[in-house]
Image (cartoon, grey):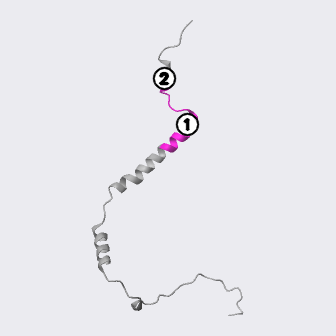
Amino acid sequence: MLSEPKYRRCVLSLMGPREEDNSVLLLGTIMIICGLIAVVPAMFETRSAVADKASWIASRQAPIEAGLLVPARVIVPFTPNTTPSAR
């Protein structure tokens, strides 16, 4: 009788995941790639000096008094005229 080769066990362990686990593996890989795409640019993002200066100036200004504000026009949502004779 012939015995199986000893290297067969090693070949089976290097075959990869079972077919049922491929969708989970693909989902995990895509999740990691999308996470890296979102996180890596955020790590290198710098704050704008103009925005910092504008926020600093706005924080130092005195608050606006309510009497000096001009009332704004309020636009209401459209309501169709279902009875044109009653205006």
Q: Nearer the viewer, mark 2 or mark 1?
A: 1
Relative image position of residue 9 (x, y in whole percent): 50, 20
The residue under the point 31% across, 81% down is: 61
Relative image position of residue 17 (x, y in whole percent): 52, 33
Majority secondary structure of magenta residues: helix
Around disc 2, counting alpha carbons within 10 Å, would you say few (fewer than 14), some (14 to 19), or many (20 or more)? few
Q: How many marks?
A: 2
The residue under the point 41% across, 51% down is: 37
Element marked by disc 2:
helix
Q: CA distance from mark 2 to mark 1?
A: 19 Å
In primary-sequence order, the first of circles 2 and 1 is 2
Provide the residue designation for mark 1: 21
For the record, the magenta segment spans 10-28
Residue type at mark 1: give it: Asp
Residue type at mark 2: give it: Val
Q: Tell me the tag on residue 11.
A: 2
Say which of 63 and 84 sits in front.
63
The residue under the point 58% across, 36% down is: 20
The stretch drawn in magenta includes residue 43: no
Around disc 1, counting alpha carbons within 10 Å, would you say few (fewer than 14), some (14 to 19), or many (20 or more)? few
Q: Is residue 66 above or below residue 16?
A: below
